[in-house]
Each structure stands twice: as structure tokens, then as C-alpha cells.
Amino acid sequence: MLQFAATSATGSAGHLHARTESAVTEASYAGPHHWQISGWAKWVRRAMRRRAYTRWVDRYCHPLTVHGLEHLDGLTEPAILVANHQSHMDTLVLFEGMPESIQRNLYFGAAADRWYVRGKKKLVLQPWYQSMVLGNFPIVRGGGAKALEYAGWLLRQGCNVCIFPEGTRTTKDELGRFKPGVALLALEHGVPVVPVYLSGLREMRPKGAQYAKPGPAGVDVLAPVRFAPGTSVEVATARLRDALARRHAEERAAIAANEEAGAFVYESRAEAHDQAA
């Protein structure tokens, strides 16, 4: 197993909980870097794609299974992608699961207090690298509506953005509470939201682990969610969570059924062995 550095895109604005990891002010953060959507930056990102994304997915995702790409066929406008947040592998696997039409114009929200701190020498991937090579942009957790400004600017430029509305990687078998930032963005800019369900990644590299271990991974693209004018933020947020929660329940039920079937086979073999003896 190899250790690697990968940015975990994270949460939305609204009332994101503050992390006490370091007492930094907004002035201590680098970015956002508007140049990241320029032609030359996109060229660099594409040239560096294998180093930044593909090699890690190839090494650890055995296999990577992708379903639901047909839900992206009808998208003609920029969209917000949302996904359940399990691991530092999430952004890598989600990106690799997308078609080229999405990949070349997709930007991930990343926690400013973790990945965009000025002068943080221990930061393996510096802010400029985050923006240029990984296509990330900073989100200030607990920054209120202002934390959404750059994401809104990206949408106005015709870019797709990905935000993890739980705001942090989960350590449980259930989805966390969704922050309202994605709903605010979608309602303000009138864009669809595409839920993406990721599976297998918490087992591959759980929160707190320094290393990843190979295993199966899945990307399931669900039908885009569109909100009618006048939809409340609360209702919109609940609809997004419900979409992923239904898929999550299906996944947990399938895992439980497989475990039960495996236990039945084991018990049957043990019983047959005892009878033979």
C-alpha cells in the first residue's frame, strides 16, 4: 500500500461548522484563483490528469463500476454535482467516473482551512497546485453566504461545480446532515443538481487513515434534480438528501444481503463437513 496526497472536496456554505484545527482568518487563505478556468490552465490540468487522478484510481479501485451516465446526456447548462462524502478518494473516483464533457469543465469545492492556508509548509499540495492541477477552489467553512460567491461565479462562467453537502467525511453507515449551501446556489442560479452516490471508498481509505487499500468502488449518477421557482431552501436541501439517502439505503441492504448469503454458505459448508466427519 502506498501513501498519497489527495484533496478531499468538502461541504457547502451556509452554517458550516468551523474546525478548530488552526486559528486562521480569512486573510490567511490563498485563492480563489480565477485563472484556473483559462485555456492554458485547462491544458495543464488535462496534461497532469493521469498524475493527479487516474493513476490512483487505477491502483486502488479494483474494479471501478460506473452507472447512470445516461442521466448526464440531456444536460446543456452548467450543473452542481453533489455526492456523499466518505474518503479522501472521493474526488478522484468521482472525477474518473465522469465523461470527458464533464471532466474538462468540473471544479471541486475544497476546505480552505485544510488545503488553502497561506504559508503552510506541511501542506503537500500547495494552493496553486490545488487550483491549477486538481481544479479545486476554496470554501471557507462557516463563512456564510460569502463562501458561495466563487462557486456562483464559476456557474455564471458555464462551469460545473462539485460540492459535498455533508461538509465532512462520514465515519458512520448513514448520511450526515446536508448543509444548505448547494440548495442556495441551485435556487439562485437556476441550475440542476446531479446527485452522485459513491460506494466502497470508506472501506478503501476511511477518515483518519494515512493509507489506501485496494478494493471495489462505485459511482452511481442519479437523475438531475431541478427546483421550481419559489422552492424553499429547506425543501430543496431535503430533496437532495432524500435522493442520496434512498440510494444509500439500497446499497446498505445489498451489502447486508450479501453478508447474510455468505454466512449461510459458510454455515452450510461447516455443517456438511461435520456430517462427513
Image (cartoon, rainbow, N blue to C red):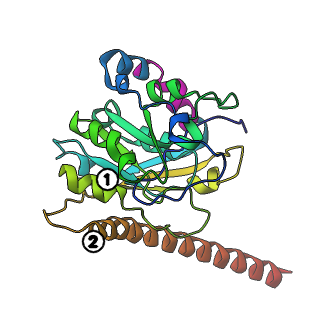
Mark yes or no: residue 222 visible.
Answer: no
Can you say which quadrant of the picture contains the C terminus?
bottom right
Point out residue 233 in the picture as x, y percentages from the top left corner: 28, 66
Work out whether 238 lies above or below 47: below
Circle 1 SS class: loop
Residue 56 on the magenta span: yes
Q: Amino acid at mark 2?
A: Val
Q: CA distance from mark 2 to mark 1?
A: 25 Å
Magenta stretch in the rendered image:
46-57
Q: Amino acid at mark 1?
A: Gly
Furthest residue to the top? 40
Q: Is residue 83 left or right of residue 7?
A: left
Work out whether 214 lies above or below 179: above
Please name the residue shown 69% across and 80% down the image.
268
Point out residue 49 in the picture as x, y percentages from the top left corner: 46, 25
Circle 2 SS class: helix
Point out residue 234 in the picture as x, y percentages from the top left corner: 30, 70
Please name the residue shown 64% across and 50% down the image.
205
Residue position for label 1: 68
**Closest to the observer, 29 or 204:** 29
Task: Point out the tag, 2 or 1, that comes first from the N-terminus.
Answer: 1
Q: Is residue 172 left or right of residue 141?
A: right
**Quarter occupied by residue 76:** top left
Please name the residue shown 63% across and 35% down the image.
5
Point out residue 136 in the picture as x, y percentages from the top left corner: 44, 35
Residue position for label 2: 235
